[in-house]
Image: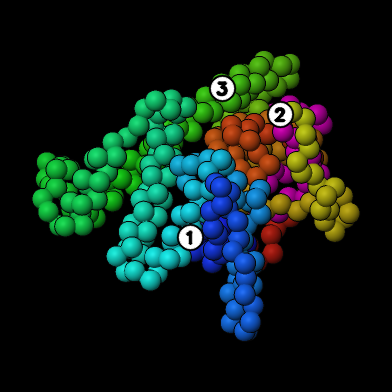
Amino acid sequence: MKKLMIAAMVTAPMLFAACNGKHTAPKATLETSHDTLAYEMGMAYAPSEAELKMYLSDPRTGSDSLQIEAFMEGMREGLEAAKDKKQAAYIAGLTFGTQLSGNLTQVEKMVFGNDSTKHLSRKNLIAGFMTAYEGKKTALLLDGKPADKMAAQQDLNTRMDRLSQEAFERDHAEDKKKSEAAMAQKAKEAGVNKLPGGTLYKVLTEGTGAKAKEGQTVNVIYEGRLENGEVFDASAQHPGADGKSTPMVVGRLVPGFNEALKAMPAGSKWEITIPYDQAYGARGGGPFPAFSNLTFTVEVVSIEETPNAEQ
């Protein structure tokens, strides 16, 4: 219930009165079950002071944690607006505009980075909004033709995807540089070779068995580490039937790991370093930071056909 309240703060049913600039609760009169119902709703929906400050500090509100008094007054007016359709519409528009401003602020962050002195035109946003709403001739030309709302939405989605990627690359430029430098340095180490896809490997034990093919199951003893040495996965965490190795199907793993398994004869033990673009990509995810190269020690114990494997 608290989450619902935070998502729609303006509907929280709790009245406050101003007293010397300090919000105070009016004295409750709990004479009927309906009185109690309203009071309980107010208590249930009420945020803690910390939650309200966190909500107001969210960039999407355009406010800050010091504006609690103004919030309380706005909430009171929002509750009272239900009695007046015109005022209710105004409050709804105010809420919509505030949410739109929050979205605009997020886009400005993508476009201008940390430069808070630059802003997108609110006037142009309103002009576009009213033009689309009223169905009037647009000032937006796409492919030399006036754009309708659907065309504008499609073009906006394309722009947003590009802006998001550009912002990501700008914010993580140093991570990418460090990742690529680490791979270049690793490639210079004695005994290190490179597979066609870019994965580096060093043979620790030379195997003499067969090599796995796409779709086959490889029983592997392995340990995976991030660039800081942290172990993020290992066969010891989920051993197979032999109590040591983990079965893996070639073709169902990250590209660099698939390529290495197909290059390793059974009985081999390698150290492999997979570049980020052959692992979890530039964005990473989960335990993997952006532009993460991954290092594994991998031992191929045996190779077998995968039961019910798709041909």
Question: Where residue 227 is drawn, which disc sits there?
Answer: 2
Question: Where residue 76 is drawn, which disc sits there?
Answer: 1
Q: Is residue 258 left or right of residue 12?
A: right
Q: Is label 3 or label 1 in front?
A: 1
| Residue 88 placement (x, y as % from top left) | 35, 64
Q: Residue furthest front?
A: 20
Q: CA distance from mark 3 to mark 1?
A: 48 Å
| Residue 171 placement (x, y as % from top left) | 51, 28
Q: Amino acid at mark 1?
A: Arg
Disc 2 is placed on an element classified as loop
**For marks 3 and 2 on the same chain, the one whose residue lies earlier in the sequence:** 3
Nearest to the observer: residue 310 or residue 135: 135
Instruction: Write the start and end of the magenta stretch as one range.
Output: 201-226
Was residue 108 drawn as part of the magenta stretch in this picture? Answer: no
CB atoms of marks 3 and 2 within 8 Å: no
**Residue at 66% over, 24% down:** 193
**Residue at 68% over, 34% down:** 294
> Is residue 213 among what the camera can see?
no
Question: Where residue 174 is drawn, which disc sits there?
Answer: 3
Q: Residue furthest right?
A: 243
- Quarter residue 273 falls in: top right
Q: Is residue 241 left or right of residue 203?
A: right
Q: Amino acid at mark 3?
A: Glu
- Quarter residue 307 falls in: bottom right
- Quarter residue 263 falls in: top right
Label 2: few (<14), some (14–19) or many (≥20) C-alpha neighbours in 10 Å: some
Disc 3 is placed on an element classified as helix
Nearest to the observer: residue 263 or residue 177: 177
Q: Is residue 176 left or right of residue 202?
A: left
Q: Amino acid at mark 2?
A: Glu
Q: How many marks?
A: 3
The quadrant the N terminus occupies is bottom right
